[in-house]
Amino acid sequence: MSSSLQHRVRLGVNVDHVATIRQARGTRYPDPVFAAQLAEQAGADQITIHLREDRRHIQERDLQVLRKTVQVPLNLEMAATAAMVELALRYLPDIVTLVPERREEQTTEGGLDVVANAANLANVVAQLRNKDIVVSLFIDPEASQVAMAAQLQVHTIELHTGDYCNARSQAVQHHHLTQLRLAALQSHDLGLQVAAGHGLDYRNVGAVARLPHMAELNIGHAIVAQALLVGMERAVRQMSEAMHKPMELGH
């Protein structure tokens, strides 16, 4: 594959951290629903929210209102639990991304172990697919995880980019980018759509957007942080530009 993008990678904007600011004071503002509207106007291809079991940021009200107002696809990240499945079946988001979840973590750390949890995931995936919900699994870029995701008959895998984003040297970053590349190629060969996310920002996003068969990136914290300084619409446009900026010669 050449260094130029063969297609436009979709941008999913995660508005969780707009709700984080709201919940810090228990107010009605800032409203992630309004933030999602601004993101749409700026060209976001998808709105992503993570409704956590502890409700630390996004609330059920947000899911309910966004389901009625979002014009682009709505992607609900959630744990593969009976309670969360019940909510998904009630509100019917366009996409459900199943993620690991621990209450003590600041944010999602690592991908979902689909090999160890295959039996439970098979049941959850079947329930969601039965309602025509697109199902994605948030996984580490490991061959065994990708292979099991394909066996579970999901539509999409979202590759965890945290290790790549947190790399402290170019050598380590290159290693993790290679792992992501191999996982993307394997996923495509197995008939899975390829997405990625976690820790992506304006400086590191370009290399991930250029990975083979990359269809979609989900980005939240960096966009919301930038929006505090320049506004949501400008922050979204800047991220889209960073994703699709041509790679400089010599890189």
Image: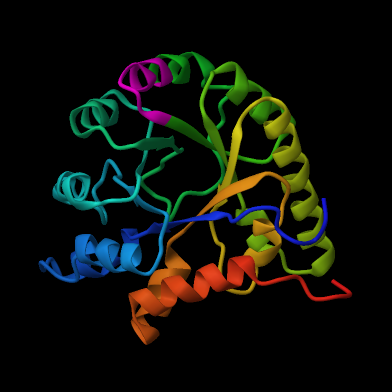
Q: Residue at x 43, y 66 (%)?
A: 221
Q: Residue at x 40, y 64 (%)?
A: 43
Please state which of residues 151 and 155 is positioned toward the viewer in this rendering.
Answer: 155
Q: Position of residue 23 (x, y in %)?
A: 20, 64
For this orientation, the residue located farthest to the right is 250
Image: magenta residue range = 125-134
Q: Position of residue 137 (x, y in %)?
A: 51, 34
Q: Position of residue 19 (x, y in %)?
A: 25, 62
For this orientation, the residue located farthest to the front is 7
Screen quadrant of the C terminus: bottom right
Left or right: 135 in relation to 66: right
Q: Is residue 72 above or below residue 36?
A: above
Q: Residue at x 78, y 69 (%)?
A: 169
Scheme by which the image is coloured: rainbow
Does the magenta stretch mainly form a helix, a strand or a loop?
Answer: helix
Q: Position of residue 88 (x, y in %)?
A: 26, 31
Left or right: 30 in relation to 183: left
Left or right: 203 in relation to 211: left
Q: Is residue 211 above or below residue 244?
A: above
Q: Is residue 29 magenta?
A: no
Q: Residue at x 69, y 33 (%)?
A: 188
Please give the count of numbered marks on the rendered protein.
Answer: 0
Please state which of residues 35 and 171 is positioned toward the viewer in this rendering.
Answer: 35
